[in-house]
Image: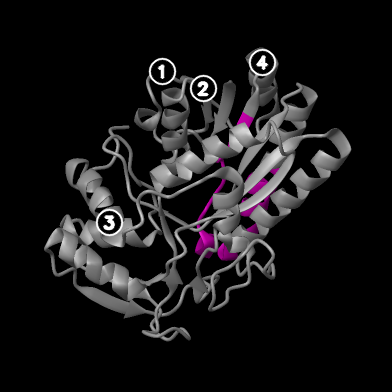
Amino acid sequence: MNVLVTGGAGYIGSVVAAELLRAGHAVTVYDNLVHGHLSAVPEQAIFIQGDILDDPTLERVMAGGCFDAVMHFAAFIEAGASMRQPGRFFRNNVSGSINLIESAVAHGVPRFVFSSSAGVYAGQDTPLTEDDPIGPASVYGQTKLMIEEILGWYHRVHGLRYAALRYFNAAGATPERGEAHEPETHLIPNILRVALGQRDHFTLFGNDYPTPDGTNIRDYVHILDLASAHLLALEALAERAEMVYNLGNGAGYSNLQVLETARQVTGHPIPTEIAPRRPGDAPALVADASRARHDLGWEPRHHDLEEIIASAWEWHRTHPEGYED
């Protein structure tokens, strides 16, 4: 298939683009490089610099691409920032996605795979299924929910076949690609920056949550396992026209457990300071991904938290300044 990957210079999008190429698909990466990195784009992919809010450029790409599918990763992702700048998130995530979906439908693209989030759910103590209550705790989560709903209507009105993949905490790295956001808001890379000597301490936001050790609990899923699910969903759209799946390991780890594991992996003490909670952070988010396992035949291969952190540490250790560009 010929696949357009928006946000394909970013953390998840670049790994998915590489796996698509490895599977024999043709890939065009479309990214504005605001948060992505040109050197993360696989060499075999066609790269076009552009924004999903830039209608003329998006139209030219769609008109000339003859794409069989779109995989959409181009979104702002910082939950805390979304609570301070809601308009920025609604504009980019929702309005930009409408532009992309409209263009895909106008040019007869039949399949659309959307990078959604566990942020659409109301948090709870037990693993979340796709049927559990929806209740975003942040504007970011609300934008993902809105895009899912928009895709549902475009399916009903125009027959667009789509998969919305609600993954939990993407983590880990491949030898070529790792996590390098700026600003970095994710737990594992911020912990590892201390081990690299780039920061003198790690800041832990909140230790008074209603969890066993008072810190957030999250389900960490390796980036390669996420990528494999995207490829399976892409193929499954030939048989099923509308899909929503959780992607996670089904095991929750608290922030303190992640911190201690990182200390063991890196051999660094990683001094830590406690700060107030961040707005929009749910106490616990853990996946029940049994539906994706059953329907897609998806099987995560990198379950162990130590393995996930070790892969991230190897990438950060060998790329201390991140990407070259």
Whichever of labels 3 and 4 marks the residue nearer the N terminus, that label is 4
- The answer to whether the residues at label 1 and label 3 have Cβ atoms under 8 Å apart is no
- The answer to whether the residues at label 2 and label 1 have Cβ atoms under 8 Å apart is yes
Whichever of labels 2 and 1 marks the residue nearer the N terminus, that label is 2
Look at the image and tell me whether residue 71 can be seen: no
User: Which dot marks residue 44?
Assistant: 1
Q: In front: 243, or 261?
A: 243
Q: Secondary structure at mark 2?
A: strand
| Residue at image mark 2 | 27
Whichever of labels 1 and 3 marks the residue nearer the N terminus, that label is 1
Q: Is residue 31 left or right of residue 275?
A: right
Whichever of labels 2 and 3 marks the residue nearer the N terminus, that label is 2
Q: CA distance from mark 4 to mark 1?
A: 18 Å
Q: Position of residue 266 (x, y in %)?
A: 15, 59
User: Which dot marks residue 66?
Assistant: 4
Question: Which quadrant is home to the N terminus?
Answer: top right
Q: CA distance from mark 2 to mark 3?
A: 29 Å
Q: Is residue 314 left or right of residue 301?
A: left
User: Which dot marks residue 309?
Assistant: 3
* Label 4 CA crowd tier, 10 Å (few <14, some 14–19, many 20+): some
* Label 1 CA crowd tier, 10 Å (few <14, some 14–19, many 20+): few
Residue at left offset 76%, top offset 21% = 107
Residue at left offset 31%, top offset 61% = 305
Q: Position of residue 201 (x, y in %)?
A: 22, 68
Q: In front: 302, or 325?
A: 302
Q: Which residues are magenta?
A: 70-95
Whichever of labels 4 and 1 marks the residue nearer the N terminus, that label is 1
Question: Which quadrant is home to the C terminus?
Answer: top left
* Label 3 CA crowd tier, 10 Å (few <14, some 14–19, many 20+): many
Taken as a whole, is the magenta stretch helix, strand or loop? Answer: helix
Q: CA distance from mark 4 to mark 2?
A: 12 Å
